[in-house]
Image: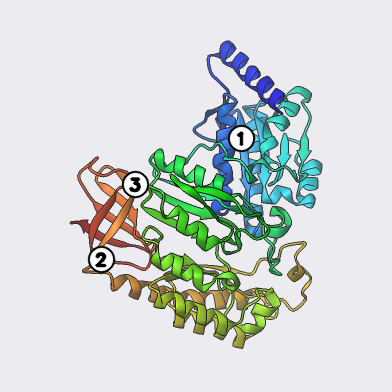
């Protein structure tokens, strides 16, 4: 592999000497924070090989699509964007290379579809062999033929190394603590495209976060399909106690969270996603007692009906979810969630149960979706589909229930002063987020604040999805 890296780097050096510019790349990312983190790793890898960042897909010498397949609408949107880029390549940029990676392309039927119907796409790779992108690039450049490889690499280097990345934001970063998922929810394609759960050694995670903090990162998002099950199957790992001589074992998520909380320089720690069945009382204590850990947790509900939850293979009941939510809120921890409407077999009674949970828990935020069939999942074979018009009506009723609650929660913040971490500062307009992840707009003197600073803001106005205020 190192030889391939050297050959490709030399190839790019030759282009730069000939044209005066190194070849450029642009990565378009779809989907979750995991995909965003993967894109940062791909960008870091390409930068090592001499590629420079382009301003857009259309101007790039290498266009990379890092894809999502959680919902059919995402796949349709991706193929629409690919078709538009095809026109650019065929009419203006014949030497452009187009690579498609990520969860969508990991599906064998999608890879076959691209091979049969999209010959203008040069490279197709998967989720567990993305580190081999230089090899695939070299093959495509040398052969001029389409390269399709979605084989999973058992020696996935990111499991036991600190990956090289190019960050999208100077003040915050995501850090993978694990890959894959063992839960096999009946509607979800993720375990089939991301593989089984694999935890990274704590020593590598801590080294990566320490380096990020030293480089100015103030907020860390610990990432995994189910961070609560971190450490399952992981050999006990002895690591230094951040400068102390003794060692400790870290083989579960609460222990890891407490250790990350000790790292100097960090101001905020977040994590996602959590599965309710694995959210222990020890983890509640770790969140409550760790001063840098934000007191808001994303806890997917999916449905409020115990019957539907069983069909979904979620492995908890409505009562168990409500009990967990109550314990979290009693510890001062707010909740956001995911909810699916119109899962096969969902009755009006089932849907009313979802509305009831939303009313009781009063979520700080909710990602709401109409059920999307995913080929290869158990739910895809169900015949008792909810008619689309009924799903749409229920979706509207759900948002009509949730949005007023969001507004009420935000209105209760008016008159208070909250610490807000700056995310964007352009001119006098500044945007940031509170500890519970609420978006805040305020004004300040141009250049006064930079991303990563925490500013006290007096809240003066509330909307459903954001609040406004003035710097104290």
- The image position of residue 234, as x and y in percent, is 65, 55
Tag 1: Cα neighbours inside 10 Å, few (<14), some, or many (≥20)? many
Sequence-first disc among 1 and 2: 1
The quadrant of the image that shows the N terminus is top right
Provide the secondary structure element on which disc 3 rests. Answer: loop
**In the figure, 396 relative to 465: above or below?**
below
**In the figure, 414 relative to 121: above or below?**
below
Q: Which mark is residue 386?
A: none
Q: Which residue is mark 2?
A: 461
Q: Residue at x 25, y 65 (%)?
A: 461
Q: How did the renderer colour the structure?
A: rainbow
Task: Give the side of residue 113 with respect to residue 282, left or right.
Answer: right
- The image position of residue 396, as x and y in percent, is 51, 75
Provide the secondary structure element on which disc 2 rests. Answer: strand
Q: Is residue 441 visible?
A: yes
Q: Which residue is mark 1?
A: 63
Q: Which mark is residue 452?
A: 3
Contact between marks 2 and 3 (CB within 8 A): the answer is no
Q: State the separation of the CA atoms marked 2 and 3.
A: 23 Å
Q: Residue at x 81, y 43 (%)?
A: 116
Q: State the separation of the CA atoms marked 3 and 1.
A: 30 Å
Could you say which is closer to the camera, residue 211 or residue 242?
Answer: 242
**In the figure, 386 relative to 94: above or below?**
below
The quadrant of the image that shows the C terminus is bottom left
Q: Quadrant of residue 117?
A: top right
Q: Residue furthest front?
A: 245
Sequence-first disc among 2 and 3: 3
Q: Residue at x 44, y 65 (%)?
A: 287
């Amino acid at each position: 592999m190192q030889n391939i890296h050297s050959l490709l780097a030399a190839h790019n050096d030759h282009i730069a000497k000939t044209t005066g510019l190194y070849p450029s790349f642009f990565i378009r990312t779809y989907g979750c924070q995991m995909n965003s983190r993967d894109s940062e790793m791909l960008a870091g890898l390409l930068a090592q090989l001499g590629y420079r960042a382009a301003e857009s897909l259309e101007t790039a010498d290498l266009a990379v699509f890092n894809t999502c397949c959680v919902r059919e609408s995402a796949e349709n949107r991706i193929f629409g964007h690919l078709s538009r880029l095809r026109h650019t390549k065929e009419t203006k940029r014949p030497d452009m290379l187009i690579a498609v990676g990520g969860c969508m392309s990991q599906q064998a039927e999608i890879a076959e579809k691209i091979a049969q119907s999209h010959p203008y796409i040069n490279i197709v790779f998967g989720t567990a062999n993305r580190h081999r992108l230089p090899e695939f690039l070299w093959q495509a450049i040398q052969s001029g033929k389409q390269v399709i490889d979605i084989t999973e690499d058992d020696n996935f280097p990111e499991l036991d190394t600190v990956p090289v990345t190019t960050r999208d934001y100077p003040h915050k970063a995501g850090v993978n603590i694990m890959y894959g998922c063992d839960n096999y929810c009946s509607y979800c394609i993720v375990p089939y495209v991301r593989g089984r759960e694999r935890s990274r050694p704590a020593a590598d995670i801590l080294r990566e976060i320490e380096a990020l903090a030293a480089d100015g990162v103030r907020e860390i998002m610990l990432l995994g399909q189910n961070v609560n099950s971190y450490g399952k199957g992981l050999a006990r790992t002895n690591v230094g106690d951040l400068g102390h001589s003794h060692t400790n074992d870290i083989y579960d998520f609460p222990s890891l969270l407490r250790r990350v909380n000790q790292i100097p320089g960090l101001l905020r720690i977040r994590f996602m996603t959590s599965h309710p069945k694995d959210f222990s009382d020890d983890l509640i204590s770790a969140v409550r007692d760790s001063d840098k850990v934000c007191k808001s947790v994303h806890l997917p509900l999916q449905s409020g009906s115990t019957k539907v939850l069983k069909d979904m293979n979620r492995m908890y009941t409505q009562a168990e979810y409500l009990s967990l939510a109550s314990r979290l809120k009693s510890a001062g921890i707010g909740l956001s969630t995911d909810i699916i409407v119109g899962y096969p077999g969902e009755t009006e009674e089932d849907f009313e149960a979802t509305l009831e949970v939303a009313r009781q828990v009063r979520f700080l935020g909710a990602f709401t979706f109409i059920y999307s069939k995913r080929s290869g999942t158990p739910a895809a074979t169900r015949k008792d589909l909810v008619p689309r018009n009924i799903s749409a009506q229920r979706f509207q009723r759900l948002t009509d229930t949730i949005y007023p609650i969001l507004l009420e929660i935000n209105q209760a913040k008016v008159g208070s002063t909250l610490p807000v971490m700056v995310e964007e500062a352009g001119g006098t307009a500044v945007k940031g987020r509170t500890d519970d992840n609420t978006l805040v707009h305020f004004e300040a003197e141009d250049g006064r604040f930079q991303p990563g600073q925490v500013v006290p803001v007096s809240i003066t106005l509330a909307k459903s999805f954001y609040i406004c205020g003035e710097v104290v």
